[in-house]
Image (tube, rainbow, N blue to C red):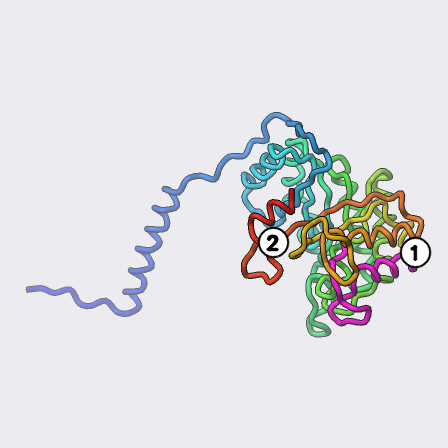
Amino acid sequence: MLTQPPLSSFWRWINIGARLLLVWFVLRDLAPAPPRVTPGSPQTVETLHPEVCVHTRLTDEVEEWKIQRNMIMVRELGAPMIVEFFPWPYVEGQRGTYDWAHFDRIMRHAENQGISVIARLGLVPGWARPPVHEKVTTANYLPYEEFDTFAAFVGAFVRRYEKQISAVIIWNEPNISREWGDRPVDPEAYTELLRVSYLAAHEASPNIIVMGGALAPTMEPENSGAGMNEIRYLERMYEAGAADYFDAFSAHTYGFTHPPDDDPDPTIINFRRIELQREIMIRYGDEAKPVYITESGWSDDPRWANAVRPGQRIAYTL
């Protein structure tokens, strides 16, 4: 009886690889095609509460149909605005070269659903940060000498999306160190970033609303390495001349474990703590500026120490 000689180890792996490749081709052909996305006819938002806004997170959403579905749900909810994050590194991977494709998709579907966009701008591309061999930095580390470069991005963004956006937020929670590149926070430096960004945005579109602040509620003392409480941080912004360089104030109002009607208290983080920031604005003669709540809420995640029960979360939010 004839027997087949055993395959060498090399040819055995070639045989296995060929079979796996064949299986991959078969499965690829059987897989459904990605959904075809067509914008459809332009829509409008019907709402009884035009001030309602949804904070979306479509920055890293690859599939266009999901972007569209999110916008449809926002419209069906009755919210005429969204807050969305648009990271600088995503469009300017190389200095002076922009790729707007993903941002264009988000804006196109927002506009088609009748939704206006409040755009939060931030993060820093690697080429704008110190080389790794000189200093290890995070994506939130913006060297002071690159403030004008960031402002140029702000201007280019506003110029491109003038018709789709209602406002831009300059940076996020600059009063905590992890959002300021893991270095000591610097309200005077943030005020300078706000100034150059404000000028660039208004040069691109005179009617754009530039929002400053977006400060994190925190109890950190002034010289803490982790950050600075937002009340003192805002005072120092005004002392540095920030009043002339933002049109509206962006506020983060997290309730933690406290009901929404609890009185504001400088020793407690609760929903009405924003009123303490408003007092600072009034003290510096800035009471005419509106305040936009761009982040807010309560968490019912049981893994978090400051969580509430699901029923409480619903009641507090309503």
Q: Residue at x 55, y 50 (%)?
A: 310
User: Does the segment drawn in magenta span residue 32?
Assistant: no
Residue 265 locus on image (x, y percent): 78, 58
Residue placed furthest toward the front: 262
Q: Residue furthest top?
A: 41
Residue 222 among magenta residues: yes
Q: Which residues are magenta?
A: 215-241
Residue 114 image position (x, y, % from top left)? 67, 31
Is 303 placed above or below 207 here? Answer: below
* Residue 236 found in image quarter: bottom right
How many neighbours does mark 2 have within 10 angstroms: few (below 14), some (14-19), or many (20 or more)? many
Dot 2 falls on a residue whose secondary structure is loop
Residue 317 placement, left or right of 209? left
Of marks 2 and 1, which one's residue comes earlier in the chain? 1
Q: Which residue is mark 1?
A: 241
Residue matched to label 2:
299
Instruction: Give the SS element for disc 1.
Output: loop
Q: Quadrant of the N terminus?
A: bottom left
- Residue 229 rendering spot, x and y as whole percentages: 78, 63
Q: Nearer the viewer, residue 129 or 280?
A: 280
Q: CA distance from mark 2 to mark 1?
A: 36 Å
